[in-house]
Structures are given as C-alpha cells and as structure tokens.
Image (cartoon, rainbow, N blue to C red):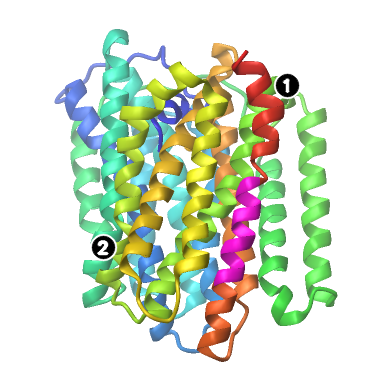
C-alpha cells in the first residue's frame, strides 16, 4: 500500500476529530504501534495465502482450481465492496471500538480458516476475514490521524506505510516457512497477534468519537458485491460449463443487471455509495481506468507464479516464497526512494508508463524463458521487474487520482480507487484460472501458463490508453 494511498484511505473518516482523554490512554507512538497491527495482518495474508494455495489443494483433493481460486477471490471481492461501506459506517461510531471490532472479526475468521474442513467453509471464513480487514483499515488510519498533531501526521503515515510494506515483503518468506509445517499455520499465526492487539488496544487506545453523517446504502454494497461476484463466477466456470451454458450466461446477466443497478443508484441517490461527480475529474478517471487492467494483471501474476513454481518446477513452498520475495521487497523501496523524484522530473504519466513497461517486461521474461527445467534467474529477475513496476505505478496512480480531487473528496476518492483495484484483482485471478483450465499433460500446462502471461501482457499494455488520454494530457503539460 502506497504512502499516497494511506494518507487518504481514511475514507470518510475525518481528521479533525480529537481523542477524548481517559485513563491509561496510549501515547501517539503507542497508537501507531497498535494500529499498525491491522495493516500487517492484511498485507501478510495476501502473499501468504498465494504461496500456500498448492498445499491447500493437496489436502482438499476433490477441489478444482476453480474452487480454490475463490479462497483468493472471495477475499478480494468482499474487501472491495465492504471497504467503502464499512469506512463510511465506522465514521458514525467510535473509531477505537470499530478498529477493535475489525481486529476481533479478522482474528476469529483466521481461526475459522485454520479449522476449515473443506474449501467451502474456508472460502466463507476468508470472506469474514475480508470484512474484518475492511473495518480495520479505515479505522486504523483514522485513529492514527486523530492521535498525532497536524505537523507530525505525514511522518506517522510514512511509518505506518513502511510497516505495511515490510509485512507484505515478508509475506512470501513467512508463508513458505509456515506452509513447510502445515498450510493451516498461515492462518493460525494471525490469532495470537490479533489477541494481543485486542488486549492492548482495549486498555490503551484513546476514544475517538464518531460523527453524525449519512448512513451508507447496504443495498448498494450488496449490488456491487453480487455484480463483481457473478462476473468472476461466470469467467471461472466458462471452461468447465461452456461459454454459452445456462449457468455462465446467467452469471453474466446477473453481473450486468447488478452493476447497472449499482450505477443507477450512484447516479440517482441523494447519498450515493460512489459519488459520480468524482469521474468528472479527468486525472481521477484516468487513474481508475489505468488501475483496473493493471490490477487484473497483478492478481493473475501473484497466482501464476505460486502455481508455476510449485506445480511445474516442483519447488517447495519455502523455495517459492524465497523466489517471490524480491518483488514485494522492491515495492516500498521503489515507491519511497524513486517514484516521487521521478514524478517531479518527468511527470506522473511517464512514471506510470515506466511501471507498465516494467511489469509487462516481467511477464514477457516468464512467457519466453520459463520451461520445464527450473530457471532461477528468470524467476527472480521477473519478480524484481514486477516489484519495480508496482512500486512506480500504484503510488503514482493513487497520488494522481486523489491529488486531483478537492480536499473534501480525498478520502472517498482513494477508497473508490482501492475498491476498483481489489475487484480487478479478483477478475484477473478468474481470467487466469479460465486460461489454465485443466491441462492433461505437462506440455499443455506449460503452454497454458505461457498463453496466460501473454494475455496478461496485453491487458497490462491496455493501461497505456487511459494513461495517455487522461493523465498525460492533464498532469504533464
């Protein structure tokens, strides 16, 4: 998660609220330490689960790749839809209690994931995890901003960001180590961390009251969730059932109707879930249109690398984690040390273009150099290029998107971009799963992966169009 994103991901949470003094209240630095647990849990979970997916498949032998993909997609879809909803809902209530509720839900759901006897219950528990994460994220940054003086907030946000980036970077390696014992440990590890955070948070966090603001529409949240879910389901099942089958066609119809109804609500409601006026700002529109294909390719990339390393090359989860780690390690390094300087010198669109090319180059390396024999340099260099690409692109898009809006819309705009990013991640995973299908031979499996990477290159390169039309013309003149 980029610095630009976390500075505005408070959603509708205001920064002018002041904590109420109470006994044993934590200092601002202690608040930072407590709320950083939320971003650590969420970021660790993303990469750990990708690395552990092949091991989960070994235990649930009757489950297909399509079924297993919902362990990732269920989380992404629920998080995408609930982030805005919970962020605005939490503004009405005490932020410290809302944060603790999110931690409690995430912790309990993690325990349920570890105990799940089948894929269906594991997916259900992952959706509950996403709900907890969607409640933790906006309330944690809201607590942080309310606890620090105005002049210290930027430094606090940068520290919060760095901690989250470090957690993401350690995710593949931690996942590889934990899966070596049992895949259930990737969820069990969240439980003691969450329990400790709950106890300390209950005793120490300051009380930050809510505000009297309009209640977000639950019906709108349900519409966008069902729309994205139905679209993802139809794509995943297309190879199994056939593109013209009744179930797949029905999935596309439900998706179209739900998303159209959601758009109608946003256009007509006095309290829209997403304010359509945001898309009247050209750079914001460009950032969202670039984010969608880029994130779809990113979601597919994460899944494909973990599956390739373990199912084609036969690597262990630990070896896979070590090979993946350079990518996420380079994201915060590139973002914090280079992206800002490059934007100042060359402009936002040029930096986004470089990020697109770097990410597409990584996929091209894999599509041309990966074969049945392990190729460690290609795997590692490819991951390094993805890390550089993501580090250049994601924070720049968040900065362009949110920075082009009036101050009153910073938070909501960043939430919308993040919602689109999470939804696109799920769709990207679904597309790659549909491309892989069920190859019989190793040659067919390799060909399917290579075909998938080339398709993801095309999807990534499609981001050049909105980058040129909306971002370059507005921000680089």
Give the left or right position of residue 199, taking residue 429 as reference: left
- Taking the magenta stretch, the answer to whether it contains residue 453 is yes
Position of residue 146 measured from the top left corner of the image (x, y, whole percent): 34, 18
Q: Residue furthest top?
A: 151
Q: Which residues are magenta?
A: 450-461
What residue is drawn where x is 59% and y is 12%?
A: 406
Q: Farthest residue toward the left?
A: 24
Q: Where does residue 204 sit, x and y in percent of width and height? A: 19, 31
Decide: is 188 above or below 269: below
Above or below — where is 111 with respect to 61? above
Q: Residue at x 31, y 16 (%)?
A: 153
Toward which corner of the image does residue 39 lie, by quadrant? top left
Q: Residues within 10 Å of mark 2 (few under 14, many from 20)?
A: some
Residue beneath the point at 40% across and 77% down: 54
Q: Is residue 269 visible?
A: yes
Image quadrant for the C terminus? top right
Kindly state the secondary structure of the residue where label 1 is placed.
helix
* Distance in Å between CA atoms under marks 1 and 2: 45 Å
Q: Which residue is mark 1?
A: 277
**Can you say whether 410 is above or below 41 in the image?**
above
Q: Position of residue 353 (x, y in %)?
A: 55, 35
According to the picture, the residue beneath numbered tag 2 turns out to be 322
| Image location (x, y in percent) of residue 101 | 38, 43
Residue 437 in the image: above or below residue 111: below
């Amino acid at each position: 998660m980029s610095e630009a994103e976390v500075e505005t991901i408070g959603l509708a949470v205001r920064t002018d609220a002041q904590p109420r003094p109470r006994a044993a209240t934590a200092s601002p630095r202690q608040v930072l330490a407590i709320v950083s647990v939320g971003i650590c849990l969420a970021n660790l979970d993303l990469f750990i689960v990708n690395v552990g997916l092949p091991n989960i498949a070994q235990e649930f032998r009757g489950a297909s790749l399509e079924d297993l993909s919902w362990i990732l997609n269920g989380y992404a879809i629920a998080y995408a839809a609930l982030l805005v909803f919970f962020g605005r809902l939490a503004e009405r209530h005490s932020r410290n209690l809302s944060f603790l509720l999110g931690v409690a839900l995430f912790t309990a759901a993690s325990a349920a994931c570890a105990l799940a006897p089948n894929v269906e219950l594991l997916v259900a528990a992952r959706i509950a995890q996403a709900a907890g994460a969607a409640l933790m994220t906006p309330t944690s940054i809201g607590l942080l901003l309310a606890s620090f003086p105005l002049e210290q907030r930027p430094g606090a946000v940068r520290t919060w960001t760095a901690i989250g980036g470090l957690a993401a970077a350690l995710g593949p390696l931690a996942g590889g180590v934990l899966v070596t014992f049992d895949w259930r440990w990737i969820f069990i590890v969240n439980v003691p961390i969450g329990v400790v955070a709950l106890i300390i948070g209950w005793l120490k966090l300051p009380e930050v009251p809510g505000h009297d603001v309009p209640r977000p529409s639950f019906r709108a949240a349900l519409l966008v969730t069902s729309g994205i879910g139905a679209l993802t389901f139809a794509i995943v099942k297309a190879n199994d059932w056939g593109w013209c089958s009744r179930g797949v066609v029905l999935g596309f119809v439900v998706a179209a109707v739900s998303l159209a109804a959601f758009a109608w609500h946003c256009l007509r409601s006095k309290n829209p879930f997403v304010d359509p006026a945001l898309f009247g700002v050209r750079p914001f529109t460009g950032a969202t249109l670039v984010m969608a294909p880029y994130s779809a390719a990113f979601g597919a990339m994460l899944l494909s690398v973990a599956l390739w390393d373990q199912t084609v090359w036969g690597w262990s989860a630990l070896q896979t984690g070590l090979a993946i780690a350079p990518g996420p390690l380079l994201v915060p390094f590139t973002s914090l040390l280079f992206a800002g300087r490059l934007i100042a010198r060359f402009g936002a669109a040029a930096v986004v273009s470089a990020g697109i090319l770097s990410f597409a180059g990584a996929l091209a390396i894999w599509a041309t150099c990966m074969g049945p024999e392990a190729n460690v340099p290609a795997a590692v260099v490819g991951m390094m290029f993805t890390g550089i690409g993501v580090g250049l692109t994601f924070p720049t898009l968040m900065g362009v998107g949110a920075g082009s809006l009036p101050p009153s819309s910073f938070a909501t705009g960043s939430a919308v971009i993040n919602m689109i990013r999470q939804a696109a991640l799920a769709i990207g995973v679904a597309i790659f799963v549909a491309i892989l299908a069920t190859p019989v031979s190793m040659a067919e499996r390799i060909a399917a992966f290579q075909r998938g990477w080339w398709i993801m290159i095309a999807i990534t390169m499609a981001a050049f169009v909105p980058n040129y039309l909306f971002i370059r013309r507005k921000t680089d003149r």
